Amino acid sequence: MKHVELARKTKSSSPWTRLAAVSLLAVAALAGCGGDDGAPGAPGAPGAPADPTVINDLTEQITALTQAASPETCSNCHTGDTGVLGIPASGKGHQFEYNKYTDLSKLRLTVDSVSSTPNSDGTTYTSTLTFTASKSGTPLTAAQVAALAQKTFYAVKYDNTTRQFTPSFSFSGGTTVANYTATATPGQFTVKAANATFAPEATSAEAYAYIADGVLKTEGMTLYDDVANAGKVYGDAASYGSTANVSACESCHGKPYMKHGYRAAQVAGLSDFGACKNCHYDSRKGGHEFWQLLKDNPVRAAEVNAGSVLTAEEKSKYAYTANIMNDVHMSHAMEFAYPQSMKNCATCHAGKTDTVLANDKFTAATCISCHAVEGLKTKMKAAKFTHDVLAASDTALKAGTCTACHDGANAPTFKTIHTGGFNSKIYSAAGQRYSNDIKVTLDTPTIVGNKLTIKFSAADTGATGFDMAKIKPTVMVGLYGYDSKDFIVAAHASNATDKKTNLEYGVGTVHPRFTTVSAAGGKWEVTADLSLWADKIAAGTIKRAEIAVMPYLDHPTLKTTTRAGDVVPDAIGLDAPSVTFNLSTGKVETDFGKIVDAAKCNSCHDQLATTFHTADRGGNVKVCRICHEVSNPGAHLEMQSRSIDSYVHAIHSFQAFDLEGIDLTDPVQKMKYEEHTASTYPNFTIKNCESCHVPGTYDVPNQGKSMPGLLSGNETLKSGTRNIGTVPAYVTGPAARACGSCHRSDKITANEGLGDMTGLAVLNSHFFKEGYLVENVTGLWDSLVAKLMAMF
């Protein structure tokens, strides 16, 4: 039969191609294809032709491959919260697991008291902390406390004059049952510190404790099913107020925010971030000198990453205090792939920027927390002002203050340099979001015959002073297929005949399918000719269009460099509106295709697109989907679709872009590649689907509402090797495309980014068996879409 012959014909040296061939044989057999005598196949399956000639004709190849493909069966097993037969559920199961981490814990903990007695040395104390612990209302025993996965008890002293916490000490505990002395109250215990440096109850101080148990199945940081934090303050420690906001941490890291997976920033009885100060007290010696080295000297950092030891001079140069400011600023500015500009001080300090940017904070230590030592020197030199401190030692530099000159008269103040702590692409000088003040609105479109009329206008509701007529809009029309959320006609894709984009139009330019009717005074009217797809519209294959406008407006001062190297004006951050228009009814459908809430994306990114695209693409993930659609492979991401689900899942799984430009024989590139692929989604696991998705839109895809996707093949490194092999481009189902994206990334980035070929083979075999994963040939995607979507 031709399916078998095609499978035999596709033998090659690639194990992936051979796997595809074997899969095709299996799928053909499962589909019940008839024998060589032309007998009919099983019900619903085509009969095989009598002639067993090897298939050479492309059309016949596509036909055979299409006939062999069957819908995915994922929802048969991956269902509910935890799946069936011990098989994990998909998105719903992931969220179910993450919700265990954020739900109210069954563990309960209180810090009841601290008491201290002087030791004979006259300088230290024996300090006793009393706490009560229970689970599900039942008091714990000493053995149960000792067996908990995490348990620690601290105290830290506070100086209200300097607002500093120091020193800190911990109480005994750990896994030794004898360290927990039971009182007469069930579940209540004492732990001791034999050489405490102060008496907490007699000073201004905090006592803090946490316990955690029940390790969860998460791929990033170790998270726990049960977590409990408790604290108690003495004296002036109750007056401490942080200049940062816990809500800012929660925006990216989830609520409640628990650093390390179990240490909460908000603890009953303590001020916000007070618990953090027990470890990150203000005299603690920092241990991550590598962070600054990574920013200042990547070549030397690569040597250290490969096993070289920091010199005494480097340790001295990059010595720092591991307080909250330094560890947060340095990790986000130097180590992590932070999705915003570090200039966005307001992200963490909203409502408190006047305090954090006051001139008394203008010290070299503050500046180094973001710029690093050499980075600060470079900034100072770039200011074209000779600072005496540059000639001094690094120790003198780090101890320096800036206000003697930067008083506003002789040199600019701290706040003048950082302009209020806002990203100037997104915010005006007054700290107002441009996207809140400048709105572009689409009227209800109309269609006569196959001509679509699109009207839209811009309004400056915040009196920003911008001229709305200077907006340079781009209109995009994506045509949905088969009642699905995916586009069968991609606006951004090139038309095979005229080589122009299908339905993407810079207003005022020449395009064979668009006409500008009017464009004046911040109002526009354009028409789009859909005649090329009239047959699909008439047949009902196309029923809806997503109509979007990207409003590009030059920033008054900012510049950007294009790929060609030209320096051009940058854009301010504006939202791109869109409407879903039913071509049959002539009505806008407001609830169609809501999958991701852009406000959730902005909780981390501040405004979508400003750090990775032009700033006129924000506020609407449907607009992202118009370009990031299923018919194209991932151009920058190997083994992924350009579809937004595949792309975003891979990006947030920290799969690397553009491997053909990465040289793993170069120590710096290798270090940066390993660092990137080892990163974790900021919720400490990617299983929090609702950090982006609308609830209920992250389970196994409904195949009647999502079309097949095209995956790219593997990329070849510029130099160096990985354990991946050669992987062809595939057409596959919506679950293998979207859900599979995270799992493919996991295998691609395994082993410090070198990959797990065996794991990838098993994963792809699963997609073969439970759906379709067919090596791509020209025209196959269209054929598979037509067959599979017709079933629904």
Image (spheres, rainbow, N blue to C red):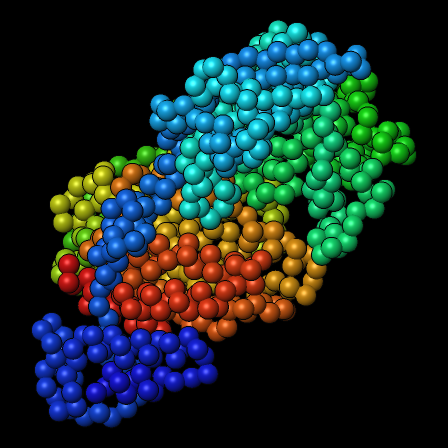
Q: Is residue 697 left or right of residue 36?
A: right
Residue drawn 53% across the image and 41% down it:
339
Q: Is residue 408 left or right of residue 514?
A: right
Residue drawn 29% across the image and 38% down it:
695
Q: Nearer the viewer, residue 422 or 350?
A: 350
Residue drawn 52% across the image and 58% down it:
749
Residue drawn 68% across the image and 34% down it:
370
For the C terminus, the image quarter is bottom left
Q: Position of residue 607 (x, y in %)?
A: 47, 36
Q: Is residue 494 left or right of residue 379?
A: left
Q: Is residue 540 above or below residue 259?
A: below
Q: Position of residue 709 (x, y in %)?
A: 32, 62
Q: Position of residue 443 (x, y in %)?
A: 26, 37
Q: Nearer the viewer, residue 138 or 539?
A: 138
Q: Is residue 727 above or below residue 454?
A: below
Q: Nearer the viewer, residue 267 or 353?
A: 267
Q: Position of residue 129 (x, y in %)?
A: 58, 17
Residue 504 in view in this figure: no
Residue 394 in view in this figure: yes
Q: Is residue 102 left or right of residue 245?
A: left
Q: To which quarter of the image does residue 459 belong? A: top left
